[in-house]
Image (cartoon, grey):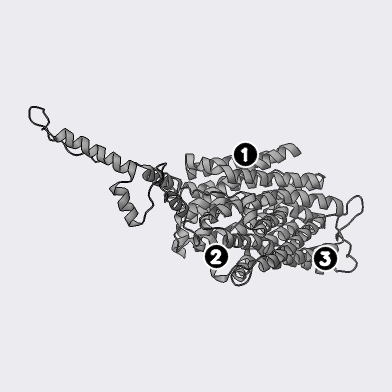
Amino acid sequence: MSTVLASVAAVLLSIAIAQLGNGMLSSLVGLRLAVEGVSTIAIGLVGAAHFVGWIIGAATAQRVIVRVGHIRAFSAFAAIGSVAILSLGFFLDLVGWALLRVVTGYCMAALFMTAESWLNSASTNQTRGKVLSAYIISLNLALAGGQFLLTLEDVRMPLLYALAAMALSLALVPLALTRSLTPEIHAAPRLGLLSLWRVSPLGLAAVVSSGLIIGSIQGGMGAVFARGIGLDTAGVSAFVATVFLGGLFLQWPVGWLSDRIDRRRVLAGAAIMVTIGSLVVMAGAGGMPQAETPADGVLAGSGLLAGIIPEGTAIWLLFIGAVIVGGAGYALYPVATAHVNDLVEPGRMIAAAGGLVLGGGLGSAIGPIMASGIMSLVGPSGLFAWAVLAGAGLAAFALYRARIRPQVPASAKTPAVVSPRTTPAVTVMATDISGAESPLESDEAMMAAATAESAVEPVVVPETVVLRNGDVPRGTADRFAESARKAISDEEEGGPDNEKRATDGSAAPDRDGADASAPKDDQAR
């Protein structure tokens, strides 16, 4: 195990340091805007801007990586992201902040794509599972640990923005000093959302719901909620970190269970757990006496139970519910991916997984906007009221699908592999681990294969004897011309070569000269 991790230690360390700053920044932006009195809806829009940039980066950053290489691309995106983060500390303007969050989201997606393609290239079929597990653990621990950097200074001070920018800059060091060979970038095709819906409506709905729930919390609204119910900065950091740690511990048990029973019922159970956990959080928020109330006095739990639930019990309920919501919410994504893989035709699993990443990103972009709208109407607990709606809706849809569609046989299931909701590059690694589909070739290898397939076989020209005086012996030219005419005739009319191929069981060319076996070969590829 130590040898395996040593080969990718620089990449894991670099992306963990970057995630440390990214995790703190999302909560920092939400807290700063809340302290400045910005409306909850505006905070949600700024939080959603990060995921808009993430979607764009996940779809387009691969071209930059292919053009300049992994280390140069990582360095460029880290530098741009650092400048964008530092700029957030210089002024306070909602439009400017939203644009800068688009930039930081794009850069973070590019950094993740660079790291994930490197990890996949540096691991083998025997070590890929260990590498992916180490990657997920390092990401979640860094995401949770970044929350506690908020306690170092007041959120209105530029120091915290400088720390987040420093994290992205320091992330360059391990990767820049590594002696590992630069890996190949892997092509990751993407299946459209409409095609995914036709294959598995429930699978697409589950990944979108995961984004709606987790994206709302990670997009800064979790920190706004915790501050709104009266927690101090340390309490805010601990609450948001608990959600991320819950996602780390519960994904594997849920994935293991989905390999043994109907995945649709597992998805329904996870959605019900999100609903229950959200209600537990709302009950805890109801026992917090310092909870804020909206101007119109309409509430959804915040402070309503302050005279019934002691404050100490309320805090316990908050953190217990956070573990449940984080664990079940994060588990929706890998189980949904495995469910789609059970249904999609062979050869399209990686493309389907790329489409699921897009679906999760869209959910993460929509979630903060919807949650902030409900919070502006009913108070801080509107965040988890939104999670209740999303969880209950998904649970009902999963049970409905289980009734109208037969269960996938156990023999046709692909193993559920826990994977992060990051970029399409990680889907290649997860699909390789499941063993359900052959690994994708690199762009260079695919181009070489295409060139080899399209190459025309050379025509063998018979040798011609030339006399010393330069004349050609009599009959030689005639024999050469006759051989050429015979070869052309065989090619046009299905001569000996084609008869031989037919005898071997291969298809003969049609009237247009196209090989009928080509579509079959293309499908196999």
Q: Are marks 1 and 2 in contact (CB under 8 Å)?
A: no
Instruction: Decide: few, some or many residues near mark 3? Use Cα within 10 Å; few <14, some 14-19, many ≥20.
Output: many
Residue beneath label 2, please? 414
**Residue in the picture at 58% in, 54% down:** 352
Can you tell which quarter of the image residue 123 is in? bottom left
Q: Which residue is mark 3?
A: 283
Select label 3 or label 2 by which is in front.
2
Q: Are marks 3 and 2 in contact (CB under 8 Å)?
A: no
Going by the numbered disc 1, the residue's amino acid type is Val
Q: What x and y, as percent, mark residue 386?
A: 78, 56
Comparing 503 with 245, the one in front is 503
Give the amino acid type for the residue marked by disc 2 in the picture.
Answer: Thr
Could you tell me how far apart the alpha carbons at marks 1 and 2 are, in whole angstroms?
A: 43 Å
Q: Secondary structure at mark 2?
A: loop
**Mark 3 or 1: the one toward you:** 3
Q: Is residue 179 left or right of residue 13?
A: left
Tell me residue 367's x, y (percent): 73, 51
Residue sitting at 19 percent across and 39 percent down? 462
| Residue position marked by numbered label 1 in the rendering | 83
Q: x and y percent of residue 284 in the render?
A: 81, 65
Q: Quadrant of residue 206?
A: bottom right
Q: Residues within 10 Å of mark 2 (few under 14, many from 20)?
A: many
Element at label 1: helix
Going from N to C along the chain, the mark reached first, 3 or 1, is 1
Q: Which residue is more in the foreground, 71 or 216?
A: 216
The tag earlier along the polypeptide, 3 or 2, is 3
In this rendering, the answer to whether 475 lies above or below 139 is: above
Q: Amino acid at mark 3?
A: Ala
User: Real-space Cα distance between discs 3 and 1?
Assistant: 41 Å
Q: Does residue 297 show up? A: yes
